[in-house]
């Protein structure tokens, strides 16, 4: 037996509709309500799936940015070391040239 919405049935009967037509109309409305309920459940599930995938994607992106940040920090440290090495080399070269030109 199909289900029907009692409120719709009562309203149609109160409005003067024959009982058999009111029953069929209430059953049809109930069918649409069930259908929309199913669609709503699928949308909720889809929203949950999308949220999970986005959270995973967001985690992957943040991990990649963390990796890039670590690489840039290492490169920055290497550049700082190279600056010091060039500075000592330049100071030594200037010192040697000064010693050679002094005599």
Image (cartoon, grey):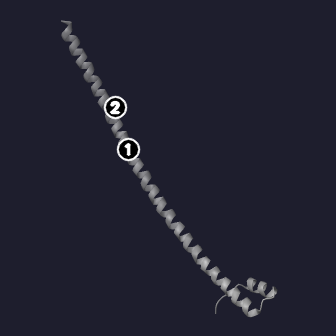
Q: Nearer the viewer, residue 29 or 99?
A: 29
Q: In the picture provided, is 42 more to the left or to the right than 87?
A: right
Question: Which element is circle 1 on?
Answer: helix
The local crowd at label 2, few if under 14, some if 14 to 19, many if 20 or more residues have their Cα within 10 Å, is few
- Residue highlighted by disc 1: 70
Q: Is residue 103 above or below residue 46?
A: above
Residue 26 image position (x, y, % from top left) = 70, 86
Q: Is residue 67 above or below residue 57?
A: above
Tell me the CA gap for discs 1 and 2.
15 Å
Please identify the quarter of the rendering in which residue 28 is found. Answer: bottom right
Q: Residue at x 71, y 84 (%)?
A: 5
Q: Which mark is residue 58?
A: none
Q: Nearer the viewer, residue 14 or 1?
A: 14
Q: Earlier in the sequence, mark 1 or mark 2?
A: 1
Please identify the quarter of the rendering in which residue 99 is found. Answer: top left
Q: Which mark is residue 80?
A: 2
Q: Is residue 62 above or below residue 74?
A: below
**The C terminus - image quarter:** top left
Q: Nearer the viewer, residue 46 or 87?
A: 46
Residue 53 image position (x, y, % from top left) = 47, 63
Q: In the picture provided, is 6 more to the left or to the right than 42?
A: right
Please identify the quarter of the rendering in which residue 22 is found. Answer: bottom right
Marks 1/2 in contact by CB < 8 Å: the verdict is no
Residue 45 image position (x, y, % from top left) = 53, 71
Q: In the picture provided, is 68 more to the left or to the right than 39?
A: left
Question: Which element is circle 2 on?
Answer: helix
Q: Nearer the viewer, residue 92 or 58?
A: 58
The local crowd at label 1, few if under 14, some if 14 to 19, many if 20 or more residues have their Cα within 10 Å, is few
Q: Residue at x 26, y 21 (%)?
A: 90
Q: Residue at x 56, y 70 (%)?
A: 44
Residue 10 image position (x, y, % from top left) = 78, 86
**The N terminus - image quarter:** bottom right
């Amino acid at each position: 037996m199909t289900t029907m919405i009692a409120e719709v049935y009562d309203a149609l009967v109160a409005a003067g509709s024959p009982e058999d037509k009111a029953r069929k109309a209430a059953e049809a409305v109930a069918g649409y309500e069930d259908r929309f309920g199913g669609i709503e459940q699928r949308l909720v599930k889809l929203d949950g799936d999308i949220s999970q995938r986005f959270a995973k994607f967001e985690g992957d992106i943040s991990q990649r940015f963390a990796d890039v940040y670590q690489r840039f920090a290492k490169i920055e440290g290497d550049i700082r070391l190279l600056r010091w090495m060039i500075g000592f080399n330049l100071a030594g070269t200037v010192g040697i040239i000064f010693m050679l030109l002094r005599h």
